Amino acid sequence: GPRWASWNIGVFVCIRCAGVHRNLGVHISRVKSVNLDQWTQEQIQCMEEMGNGKAKRLYEAFLPENFIRPQTDQAVETFIREKYEKKKYMDRSIDLNAFRKERESKWKKSESAPEIKSEPIIFEKVKLVSMSSMPCIKNLKMTSAVFIIKWSGV
């Protein structure tokens, strides 16, 4: 199952899609390993606030009903580029810049709250839940800076 995430988009991805996301460039997608990399509070917040289901509703809002998911590597790359780089299927009524500014202001406010900053956050365990589960992260719990997450399928 997926053990990768594009934290700034807020989605979990498989290893195949992680490679494509990396090739998009960090100005579009920032990829991390769920279980190998260390995660900051900001990165976790991005994942909490978006999630695969919400991102799908945003970035695939105008995907044709009869759309068949790509299977070949080239077709997958083309689809991901159309989806995230060109925003071809996106619901443009949602202002992503306003969303990001709101998110950033929340982070700035939360910086004044006491939290553990000396210890990096890592993911201990990943458990898949059904595709219909929303949002992608539920029941985020902290046990000595080790987080357990659940997410919806990719």
Image (tube, rainbow, N blue to C red):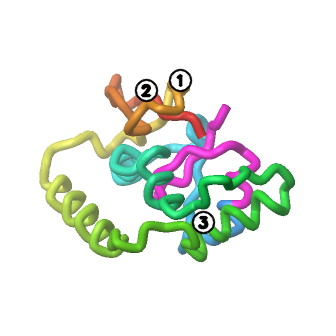
Q: Mark 3 packing: few (<14 Cα in 10 Å), some, or many (20+)?
A: some
- On screen, residue 3 versus residue 70, left or right, reads left
Dot 2 lies on which element? strand
Relative to the observer, which residue lies in front, 132 or 81?
A: 132
Classify the position of the N terminus by image quarter: top right
Are discs 1 and 2 less than 8 Å apart at CB? yes
User: For the point 72% across and 60% down, which residue is it?
Assistant: 20
The residue carrying mark 2 is 148
**Residue type pointed to by label 1:** Lys
Mark with earlier residue (3, 1)? 3
Residue furthest to the front in view is 66
Q: CA distance from mark 1 to mark 2?
A: 8 Å
Q: Which residues are magenta?
A: 1-20
Q: CA distance from mark 3 to mark 1?
A: 26 Å
Mark with earlier residue (1, 2)? 1
Are discs 3 and 2 less than 8 Å apart at CB? no
